[in-house]
Image: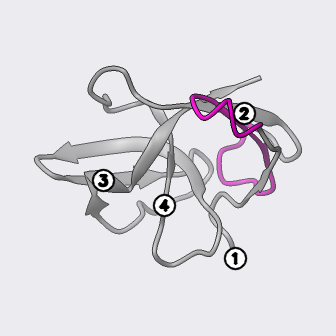
Amino acid sequence: MALGALAFGGCSDSDKAAMKYTVQSRSMEPTIRVGQNVMVVPYSSKPKEGDIVLIKHPDYAEPVIHRLALIDGAMIQTKGDANKLYDRPLPASSIIGQAFPL
């Protein structure tokens, strides 16, 4: 089961600052629903616990959208709002950007 599988909505080569995705999983419900679009932007400041982030997760082919649950130095832990369990710890460098529901 994919945790927060996304379909890339596309952006032009000249627009690398923002990416639009369509959510394909229920892991972030009720905050973000299946089929809902999100805009992902690179961080201009430090990520904060509670942010919704797009991460590159080594267990999944597609990026994952989850809430940033814990920041511990160079490591992070995320969790889908609808999931009972937290994801395994990952390097903070796994964060692609902050996600905003559209």
Q: Which residues fall within the magenta stretch?
A: 12-32
Picture coordinates of residue 40, whole percent (x, y): 60, 33
Q: Are marks 4 and 3 in contact (CB under 8 Å)?
A: no
Which of the two labelled residues, at mark 2 and mark 3, occupies the earlier sequence position? 2
| Element marked by disc 3 | helix
From the image, state whether disc 2 or disc 3 is nearer to you: 3
Q: Give the residue type that dot 1 points to.
A: Met
Which of the two labelled residues, at mark 1 and mark 2, occupies the earlier sequence position? 1
- The answer to whether residue 89 is left or right of residue 84 is left
Picture coordinates of residue 21, whole percent (x, y): 75, 43
Query: How many other residues sit within 10 Å of disc 1, few (<14), some (14-19) or many (≥20)?
Result: few
Say which residue label 4 marks. Answer: 56
- The answer to whether residue 61 is left or right of residue 78 is right
Residue at position x 70%, y 40% in the image: 13
Residue at position x 89%, y 44% in the image: 35
| Element marked by disc 1 | loop
Tell whether position 75 is magenta. no
